[in-house]
Image (cartoon, rainbow, N blue to C red):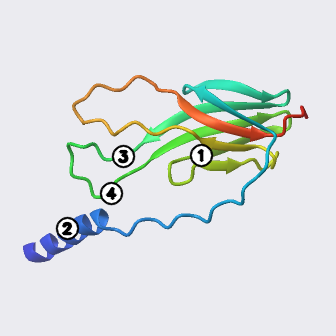
């Protein structure tokens, strides 16, 4: 029985650490926009992108494996945002594996990560202060 449990645990550990990398999603066709800008936002802050559009950086979730720990999975870092329009809100996430978002309500608005995530922190390190995330915003230059 112990050998069976050990074999199962070893399989779980090695499978989590040697899993095949995720396939990259197909690249979006290049979009031509007249206005590209880079913004930096801290968690719980907003910026106005157009008179009727606000981008809010809600939070960052970091489940990456600390360098001083043996993990079954590598984890990931995910940035959570909300686009706010007069007609409603549009939440979305960005992460290094999926760094670009095209708005559903405004398909001409493209938001992409322009930052490199900080390295994972050791388990005994104090929490890091909030850091800004840089984004590239692409949209037509005419005000809507």
Question: Circle 2: is it few (<14), some (14-19), or many (20+) Cα within 10 Å?
Answer: few
Q: Nearer the viewer, residue 111 or 130?
A: 111
Work out whether 82 lies above or below 76: above
Residue 77, image x, y percentages: 45, 44
* Labels 2 and 4 touching (C-beta < 8 A): no
Residue 87, image x, y percentages: 85, 38
SS at mark 3 in the image: loop
Q: Which residue is mark 1?
A: 93
Q: Nearer the viewer, residue 40 or 83?
A: 40
Cα distance in 3D space between marks 1 and 3:
16 Å
Work out whether 6 lies above or below 83: below
Which comes before the other along the chain, label 2 or label 4?
2
Cα distance in 3D space between marks 2 and 4:
14 Å
Question: Circle 1: is it few (<14), some (14-19), or many (20+) Cα within 10 Å?
Answer: some
User: For the N terminus, which image quadrant?
Assistant: bottom left
Cα distance in 3D space between marks 2 and 3:
21 Å
Residue drawn at (68%, 42%), measured in percent from left and top? 111
Q: Which residue is mark 3?
A: 64
- Tag in front: 2 or 4: 4
Q: Which residue is mark 2?
A: 9
Question: Circle 3: is it few (<14), some (14-19), or many (20+) Cα within 10 Å?
Answer: some
Q: Would residue 129 appear left or right of 35 to someone viewing this image?
A: left
Quadrant position of residue 140: top right
Work out whether 128 lies above or below 92: above
Residue 6, image x, y percentages: 13, 70
Q: Which residue is mark 4?
A: 73
Work out whether 75 lies above or below 37: below
Q: Would residue 18 appear left or right of 88 to someone viewing this image?
A: left
Question: Circle 4: is it few (<14), some (14-19), or many (20+) Cα within 10 Å?
Answer: some
Residue drawn at (68%, 59%), measured in percent from left and top? 28
């Amino acid at each position: 029985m112990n050998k069976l449990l050990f074999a199962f645990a070893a399989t779980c550990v090695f499978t989590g650490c040697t899993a095949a990398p995720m396939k990259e999603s197909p690249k979006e066709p290049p979009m031509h926009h007249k206005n590209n800008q880079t913004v930096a936002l801290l968690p719980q802050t907003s910026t106005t992108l157009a008179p009727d559009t606000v981008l809010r950086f809600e939070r960052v979730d970091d489940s990456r494996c600390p360098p001083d720990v043996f993990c079954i999975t590598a984890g990931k870092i995910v940035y959570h945002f909300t686009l706010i329009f007069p007609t409603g809100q549009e939440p979305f996430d960005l992460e290094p594996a999926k760094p670009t978002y095209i708005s559903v309500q405004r398909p001409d608005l493209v938001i992409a990560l322009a930052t490199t995530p900080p390295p994972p922190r050791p388990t005994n390190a104090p929490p890091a202060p909030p850091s800004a995330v840089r984004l590239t915003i692409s949209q037509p230059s005419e005000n809507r």
